[in-house]
Image (tube, rainbow, N blue to C red):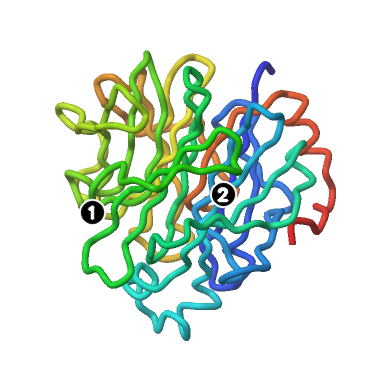
Amino acid sequence: MRQAWLFVHFREKKTPDGEQVHFAVSGDGLRWQALNGGRPVLWSYRGDLGVRDMCVLRCHDGLFRLFATDLSLAYGMPGKYQGSWDNVARRGSDCLMCWESADLVHWGKQGELRFPGTGFGCMWAPDCVKNDESGEYLLSWSSTRRGEGKPHDVWYSLTRDFREWSAPRVLLEGPAIDSAMVQEGGVWYLFVKGGTNPAGVTMLRGESFTGPFLPLQGGVRGLPEAEAAWYEAPAVYRLPDGRWVLMLDYYGVPGKGQGYVPFLAGTLADGRFTRAQEGFSFPYGFKHGTVMPITPEEFGRLLAVGEWPEEGG
């Protein structure tokens, strides 16, 4: 094994343990196994007391950083949000939850990232990528603005050290949520739910990771058009043989039928994907998250953890 993968995600459950940080690992990028017996490896003790839509990345200073939406439907939807997703979008948390770790096992105290004075309705579905040429990291998320009737835009802020952040700017005008960005051949590809096709997942390309981003000519091909509205939360990573995996979170049925569905492409340049018919397996329906390459040593370290330490509070 030359490389392995970590999948950071949440679980769609009616109990609060679903909307916490869950880990799964894979030695081949295809077959996944849950860590900690399918229980959370990190709990949120701040804000809404639950987190969703996680992203994780390896940083130049040797630390791993994890960002997540501050939201718990199990706790907040019946009362605080009165059963309304619009209330979540307009009156939800104005910060992202975040953690740091040196080894992926022991995580520091939970932090909150907010941008004072911006008036965001709910900072939703973070994604973070590094530009190796400039040394900058771009953190993106989807949000409305309080008091405005506009749909979600995709926003971003830049940093070099995760302490100083640039003023947020619009990366892509909405309606658009669930951004995920990767680079291939010097071109940046941005996947979102919405954009030019509000019903489904859109793929855009840009010469810079701050845009402008334009829809890929011909769109994303090979995705199920009849059920386009029921796919969201794109997660993108590359296999050792060079193929790209596009994971889309399907929520068109209740219960166990939900979760990520894999699609494959030889290159991102033409936007042509096919549904993976075999090889992929999941212990349960993973919900909105990201995949990060890890080393065999890190893979073994994660597998060796028995009961996950109760940290990150």
Q: Is residue 15 above or below residue 128?
A: below
**In the drawing, does residue 258 fall left or right of residue 7?**
left
Give the secondary structure at mark 2: strand
The residue beneath circle 1 is 175
Rendered image: mark on residue 82: none
Give left or right: position of 168 versus 4: left
The amino acid at mark 2 is Phe
> Type of residue at label 1?
Pro
How far apart marks 1 and 2 lie (CA) works out to 22 Å
Q: Residues within 10 Å of mark 2 (few under 14, many from 20)?
A: many
Relative vertical location of residue 52 with respect to residue 275 in this rendering, above or below: below
Q: Quadrant of residue 85?
A: bottom left
Q: Position of residue 160 (x, y in %)?
A: 56, 33
Q: Residue at x 59, y 45 (%)?
A: 8
Q: Quadrant of the N terminus?
A: top right
Lower position in the chain sequence, tag 1 or tag 2: 2
Please indicate whether residue 33 sits to the left or right of residue 170 in the image.
right
Quadrant for the C terminus, please: bottom right
Residue at point 43%, 57% (across, down): 124
Residue hosting label 2: 67
Residue 22, image x, y percentages: 64, 52
Q: Tell me what residue is drawn at x 26 percent, y 26 percent.
A: 271
Position of residue 58 measured from the top left corner of the image (x, y, whole percent): 62, 32
Task: Classify residue 308 as left or right of residue 211.
Answer: right
